[in-house]
Image (cartoon, rainbow, N blue to C red):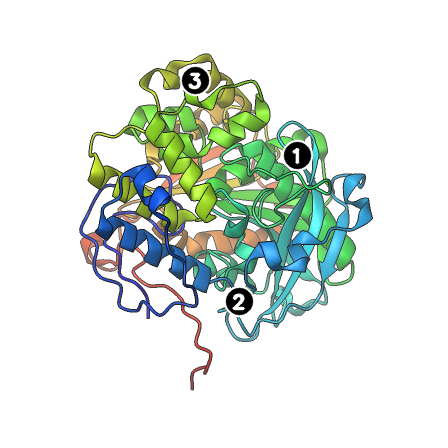
Amino acid sequence: MRPCFGISTCVFATLACVTVAEWLEPRNNTWNSSFTLTNDQIKSLGLSNEAAHNLEAVVRFEQTNWATGSVMSDPFYTDLPDNATTAPAGSLLKLEAFTNTSTYTIPPSIALSRFIYQSKTLNGTIVPVSAYILWPYHALGGVKAAPLVSWGHGTAGLVAECAPSHMRNLLYQFSGPYALALAGYAVVATDYAGLGVPFYPDGSPILHQYVASPAGGNDILYAVQAARSAFPDKLTEEFVIYGHSQGGGTAWAAAQQQVELQIPGYLGTIAGSPVTNTTMLVKATGQSLAMMQAANTMKTIWPDMDIGADMLTARGQALLTLVEELQGCSLAVEAALAGTLEADPTAALMKDEFIDSYWSSSFANLTTVGGQDFVGPMLVFHGTNDALLPEALTALSVSQTCASFPERELRYVVAQGVGHVDASYATQQIWLKWLEERFNSKSKSARSGTSSCTVETIGDDTVRPLDQYQSALNWQLFYSPDGIL
């Protein structure tokens, strides 16, 4: 059974500033976790008894959905080989060719592998990163080597325990990786640096560079090289990149990085509901949560930056500290924020002056995607009812890119009346067909088609009126130790 939390957020891509709403009692408190908050933790955010209870239930829920226990006690994530200090980016560091899926909630007739490889941070420092591969039962086209899609997930959280590779449903389940694997693709899915592998070889912590899209772009691209070296006969040389939300931004960044990296076999990129410019997001929506969660990212870029003096309020610092202590992921962030706003509805996480500061503009210059050259073709999609990332921001990035690089091939699909994750489902036929066309056309000229930027809208002629369609995910996959008939 799942806890029914009445929070007005998206489970899979938490970028909105959560509003306080009615929380329902958990239907089941018997999670495989006995986590409780300390009195100091409760006091740090001024949580009410009810808010503390809700946060505890959420953390228990997240911990119960670890397929392999804590990453801190899983040797796969903590025991790194000697070459982890020197191996170049793209190197395979560790391989678990067969991962026991009995504690995961993946579809039948799908296999799983995990591996650790070397990537680069935004600053260019080498960093070990964990990833998984979902294997199809029958590769698309019936070929021996499965066509490779490098997947970039949306917001999972900020800390090591938020790695999709150790979550039962791999975070995005049918919203991306399951759909791809069932369609015959091998899904190479990075966790992103800082999620999964918790420490560098010298024991220092690896911090996740949240919404630093080029850093995630590195993770997506170098995962391809490592996976191909692990399974040279089982994966195609050709690959396509696909990411959603945070992953949409990293996918777009990877397409930009391909201008210089030129990793062989690249066929194109899909960027779904992408994060394009975090500073503009805050200005357009007033949502500061995404930027607040990027505080540690900025510290990794500018060690001399004083987060307390330059960026976060005391409440914002307390919230970030608590999430790190709890090793909580997206739902825990939502619950902690909801409790904070319940205690003080006017509480600000970020200082008002920060958004127009040197630090904010510098961060945008380093991390924004769009308006830059890229290697296409690229398919971008976004829903007009996206409450987390306004479609208008993506439209602006597309417009700027097409104006600056009209010779590049970029197709933008606007899905009327659908939200953030919903857009992945609404456009599924489009991106699956687009993917198949990439792999079926081996020559570059046939693959690229006509170099141009196009914008199209879908949803004007749906079979039923738009307001009759399910508007968001209202379910979650749950592990059944006894199986199902």
Q: Which residue is mark 1?
A: 258
> How much space separates mark 3 and mark 2, taking CA atoms?
47 Å
Q: Which residue is mark 2?
A: 182
* Residue shown at 66% from the left, 38% from the top: 204
Residue sitting nearer the eye, 358 or 316: 316
Residue sitting nearer the eye, 283 or 235: 283
Q: Which residue is mark 3?
A: 310
> How much space separates mark 1 and mark 2, taking CA atoms?
28 Å
Residue sitting nearer the eye, 466 or 206: 206
Q: Please indicate whether residue 411 sits to the left or right of residue 376 in the image.
A: left
Residue 289 spot, x, y in % from top left: 36, 34
* Residue shown at 19% from the left, 55% from the top: 465
Looking at the figure, which quarter contains the C terminus?
Answer: bottom left
Q: Number of numbered discs present?
A: 3
Specify which label sits upstream in the sequence, 1 or 3.
1
**Would you call the spot at circle 1 few (<14 residues within 10 Å), some (14-19), or many (20 or more)?**
many
